[in-house]
Amino acid sequence: MSSEPDPASSGELPETAAKPSRNLGPLRMVWRETAKYPRQALFAGLALLITATATIAIPAGFRLIIDRGFGPGGDVAAIGRWFRYLLGLVCVLGIGTALRFYYVSWLGERVVADIRLKVQENLLRLSPSFFEENSPSEIASRMTADTALIEQVVGTTASMALRNTIMGVLGVAYLFILAPKLAAGLLVGIPVVVLPIVIFGRRVRTISRSSQDRVADIGTMVAETLGGMRIVQAFNQENRELERFSGAVENSFDTARSRFRLRAIMTALTIVAIFGSIVLLVWEGALGVAHGTITGGTIFAFIITAGLVAGAFGALTEVYGDLLRGAGAAGRLAELLNEKPAIAPPARPLDLPVPPRGKLGFEQVSFRYPTRLETPALIDFSLTVEPGETVAIVGPSGAGKSTLFQLAERFYDPQAGTIKMDGVPLTAVDPAEIRRRMALVPQEATLFAASARDNLRYGNWLADDEAIWEAARAANAETFLRDLPEGLDTFLGEGGARLSGGQRQRVAIARAVLRQAPILLLDEATSALDAESERLVQDALDRLMADRTTLVIAHRLATIRQADRIVVMDKGRIVETGTHETLTGAGGLYARLAALQFDDKAFATAQEGK
């Protein structure tokens, strides 16, 4: 037991996927971060030492009161002095505990904030290949649940470990000062008392985690069922879902029953062990008092101190388990922190020509994705896109079209061949400089949970409102943006949920307009739109493509009839090149794709009707 309150340990942490480490080695990273704040660590350590010492001094105060104030020939006038001494200790304990709580909590929050920032900074440098092999949701778990464990280690667990160690050492020393014989007997008896508690405590923790998992299963099932309620009712599966839910609830109850059964047994053992030990100590002490070998104050102080020592050593076993879990979390975070980007700036990057021309060249490029090495994405691919030229890339799924964009933006490097921008190999240039000269309009517009203004100026963060409205006008987005409740300050929701698909796409185009980049990458920007939205988006794209080098990935061949050149790809190779008219007449892959999508005469009539 402990008379010192520990406000930092009042809450429970959410469960995490982090498994306990086999050793505390991974925590070195945490201690290095903590060492950056020596002043706060020193204040926390001093407060810890003071409060631990004050806690052990309280039994000494009671000993003085009992022996010198209440005993035979006691000094009644001195009672007030000794009680003032006790009150002083209590004040020191309270102030010291408050300071300890503040500084260890400050350290915990600060260290976690620093680790999160460093991990996020490193994640933002990693190439897409890393996120192909590592689930973003699992990474998010490390950034939340694992860092919560680190916060507990720094802000609570380490403090408890040091406090209980100091209290245990000081307490044992004081016990031997008070009554060496009783102290020796107590040290022998402590393991007998603590061991059953530790064993049952571990089993209770294990079952508690299982119980929380069962509760989480219930939550998942409820969310799944309610989210799919139309399907449940449409297929008359209400009874089946109720049976499934009933099974999960009963499973949760059975696990909880095992937990509180073990806790009941542990509680009984704890009460018998602790109070039984106290009774035996009092019995032995009473005999000593009767024989005059020990005073009443001494036995009282001994019992309180013994309880503090037993509680301190018992808590250390719990603390060690928390430290191991924290080490596991630290190890998982260290993996993210130590991950090296596959694509990094060269030691001495070359500068791209100024002003930019917008020429892009692929020279005998071969590439396989790191996660799909058995399947080539590009094979001996060569293509030169001249400044201001519009080149459309078409072909069946898996032909390698999107791979061109990934390589052009240097998200990957090819295993063979060279990619050049304005005559300079991409591998010799800082990737950030390459991407500044490109604007991307993806197939599905990625918008952020932010205002319309912030989503628009994502392409150029320094753009003012005048430039933003000009870009919106060019993207056919001005009308609906002005109709938003708060204009550009309107929050668009997660993923732009408050906008339609066509509106989101026009915001993405406006963002690309603000980029003012010489090279434009269009990845099937109209494929998921209705006819009206497609017309508005296509008009915006036509204005955006003017005077820019443009690469267009297209499945709807009607959108690229006017391209300067159409490149037809299949299985990572170029199989045809030409204009719409020449390729249609050639009778090859492009002609077959065109025949599946539209009749030339019908399409021409429709175009003239527009």
Image: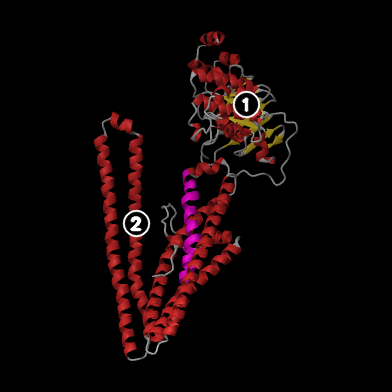
Instruction: Please state the horizontal and vertical placement of residue 344, each as a whole percent of the image.
Output: 64, 44
- In this view, the residue in front, 19 or 76, is 76
- Alpha carbons under labels 1 and 2: distance apart: 56 Å
Residue 224: which numbered mark, if any?
none
Amino acid beneath label 2: Ser
Amino acid beneath label 1: Trp
Left or right position of 43 against 259? right
Q: Residues within 10 Å of mark 2 (few under 14, many from 20)?
A: some
- In this view, the residue in front, 479 or 118, is 479
Instruction: Please state the horizontal and vertical placement of residue 528, each as a whole percent of the image.
Output: 49, 24
Which one is closest to the eye, mark 1 or mark 2? Answer: 1
Residue interval drawn in magenta: 137-166
Q: Residue at x 56, y 15 (%)?
A: 584
Residue 496 is inside the magenta segment: no
Instruction: Please state the horizontal and vertical placement of residue 187, each as a whole percent of the image.
Output: 39, 79
Q: Work out whether mark 1 precedes mark 2 in sequence or the reverse, and give the earlier one.
A: 2
Q: Residues within 10 Å of mark 1 (few under 14, many from 20)?
A: many
**Looking at the image, residue 293 lies above or below residue 535:** below
Q: Residue at x 59, y 19 (%)?
A: 539
SS for callout 1? helix
For the stretch drawn in magenta, what is the main secondary structure? helix
Residue 208: which numbered mark, if any?
2
**Looking at the image, residue 19 lies above or below residue 121:** below
Residue 469: which numbered mark, if any?
1
Q: Residue 265: tell me if it is visible.
A: yes
Q: Residue at x 31, y 74 (%)?
A: 275
